Amino acid sequence: MFKAILLLTKGIIRDQALRRKMMFWVMLVAMAMLFAGTVFMSNQWMRENPWTAIGYWLVCTWLTLTGMLLAVMDILVLRAIHRAARRKIERDLVEKERGPKE
């Protein structure tokens, strides 16, 4: 079971389109939970079921942090891709300036 979860996580992290879809859905669910928690949860319900309320808000927080970490990961991957492309362009320009080898 742990190995399957690890493989799924690697797949999500490596595929940019899937990572962005996951960010969208995770943040959408977190925002829906935030809205539902503030509108539909009453103080009386929270007093009667404190562990359920704490668990609810912990899940909401966990989803929000997951979405934020996926966004940070996406930014870091994009920076690495752009850095590699810039180095390749610089290397090509240096080789072009040197001219053909005789």
Image (spheres, rainbow, N blue to C red):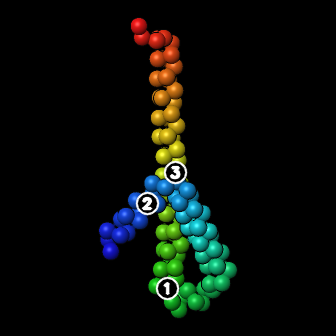
Q: Residue beneath label 2, please?
A: 11
Please, what secondary structure does the residue beneath circle 2 have?
Answer: helix
In the image, residue 28 above or below residue 68: below
> Disc 1 and disc 3: Cα gap in Å?
33 Å
Q: For the residue marked with disc 2, what is the amino acid? A: Gly
The spot of residue 54 in percent (x, y) is 49, 79
Residue sitting at the far top: 102
The quadrant holding residue 101 is top left
Q: For the residue marked with disc 3, what is the amino acid? A: Asp
- First in sequence, mark 2 or 3: give its number: 2
> Disc 1 and disc 2: Cα gap in Å?
32 Å
Nearer the observer, disc 1 or disc 3? 3
The spot of residue 22 in percent (x, y) is 54, 64
Please, what secondary structure does the residue beneath circle 3 have?
Answer: helix
- First in sequence, mark 1 or 3: give its number: 1
In the image, 33: left or right of 79? right
Please, what secondary structure does the residue beneath circle 1 have?
Answer: helix
The spot of residue 5 in percent (x, y) is 37, 69
Q: Residue beneath label 3, please?
A: 74
Nearest the eye: 22 or 99: 99
Q: Residue beneath label 1, please?
A: 52
Q: Which mark is residue 34?
A: none
Nearest the eye: 96 or 60: 96
The spot of residue 45 in percent (x, y) is 58, 89
The quadrant holding residue 64 is bottom right
Nearer the observer, disc 1 or disc 2? 2
- First in sequence, mark 1 or 2: give its number: 2
